Amino acid sequence: GAPVVASKPEGAEAKIYRDIASKVWDRVQEERGATEAAVPSIVFE
């Protein structure tokens, strides 16, 4: 069969997948920011 999101992009199931993807992306961005903040700067003089 065809993927639900491809066959009915405006359907309820597709909305659920988009909501999940949005939450995952938000978490990835948060983790990326936390990782960048936690890494010390190395300065060569």
Image: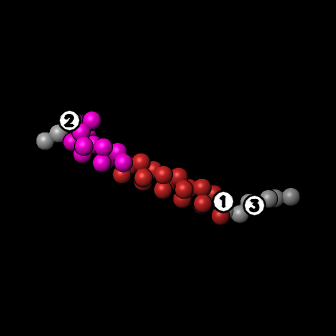
Residue shown at 36% from the left, 51% from the top = 20
Q: Which residue is disc 3 drawn over?
A: 42
Residue shown at 79% from the left, 59% from the top = 43
Marks 3/2: CA–CA distance: 50 Å
Mark 2 element type: helix
* Residue type (three-letter) at the residue carrying disc 3: Ile
* Residue type (three-letter) at the residue carrying disc 1: Ala
* Residue type (three-letter) at the residue carrying disc 2: Ser
- The x, y position of residue 39, in whole percent, is 66, 62
In the rendering, which numbered label is found on residue 37? 1
Image: magenta residue range = 3-19
- The x, y position of residue 17, in whole percent, is 31, 47
Mark 1 element type: helix
In the rendering, which numbered label is found on residue 7? 2
Residue shown at 24% from the left, 45% from the top = 13
Q: Are marks 2 and 1 in contact (CB under 8 Å)?
A: no
| In the image, residue 15 lies in the stretch drawn in magenta | yes
* Disc on the earlier residue, 3 or 2: 2
* Disc on the earlier residue, 3 or 1: 1
Q: Are marks 3 and 2 in contact (CB under 8 Å)?
A: no
Question: How many residues crowd mark 2 within 10 Å: few (<14), some (14–19), many (20+)?
Answer: few
Question: How many residues crowd mark 3 within 10 Å: few (<14), some (14–19), many (20+)?
Answer: few
Which residue occupies the extreme front position in the image?
12
Residue 41, quarter of picture: bottom right
Marks 3/1: CA–CA distance: 13 Å
Residue 5, quarter of picture: top left
